[in-house]
Image (cartoon, rainbow, N blue to C red):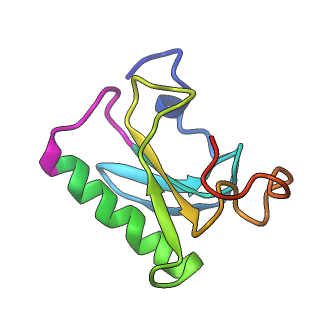
Amino acid sequence: MDEGCLLCSAERMTEWHLEDEDCWVADCIVCMTPMIVWRTHGLPDQRMEQALLTRLKTVATERYGDGGFWVDPERRRIPDHWHAHARPAGAFFDPRSTLFEGRKGGEG
């Protein structure tokens, strides 16, 4: 755990969808899309990353439907703590986000 890392602190600022010993999935405070966060500060091996992405896809399918999302693995704001977003198909922000309008098509 990194004391200064916002993802390590795991504050419940938005709705949480899943939580287990490896990760948690909650709505991102910036884009409001489901975001999965590995509990361990750093980057997982490929096997763990695939297991984490499977959990994210389960939550994303519940929200956006089968095939209604894309996984964005880019860590823009916190590059040294693994996390990924499930974004709605054809968009970057969730429609519930105040930033939704005008930012479609996977822009970042």
| Image x and y of residue 42, in percent | 31, 26
Q: Nearer the viewer, residue 67 or 97?
A: 67
Q: Is residue 89 left or right of residue 82?
A: right
Tell me the quarter of the image containing the C terminus: top right
Tell me the quarter of the image containing the N terminus: top left
46 falls in the magenta region: yes
Q: Nearer the viewer, residue 56 or 87?
A: 87
Above or below — where is 25 with respect to 2? below
Q: Residue at x 16, y 39 (%)?
A: 45
44 falls in the magenta region: yes
Above or below — where is 83 with respect to 104? above
Point out the residue furthest to the bottom here: 66
Q: Residue at x 70, y 62 (%)?
A: 94
Q: Is residue 93 left or right of residue 64?
A: right
Q: Is residue 31 left or right of residue 86?
A: right
| Image x and y of residue 6, in percent | 56, 28
Above or below — where is 69 with respect to 105? below
- Which secondary structure class fits the magenta region best? loop
Q: Which residues are magenta?
A: 38-47
* Count of marks placed on residues: 0
| Image x and y of residue 11, in percent | 61, 39
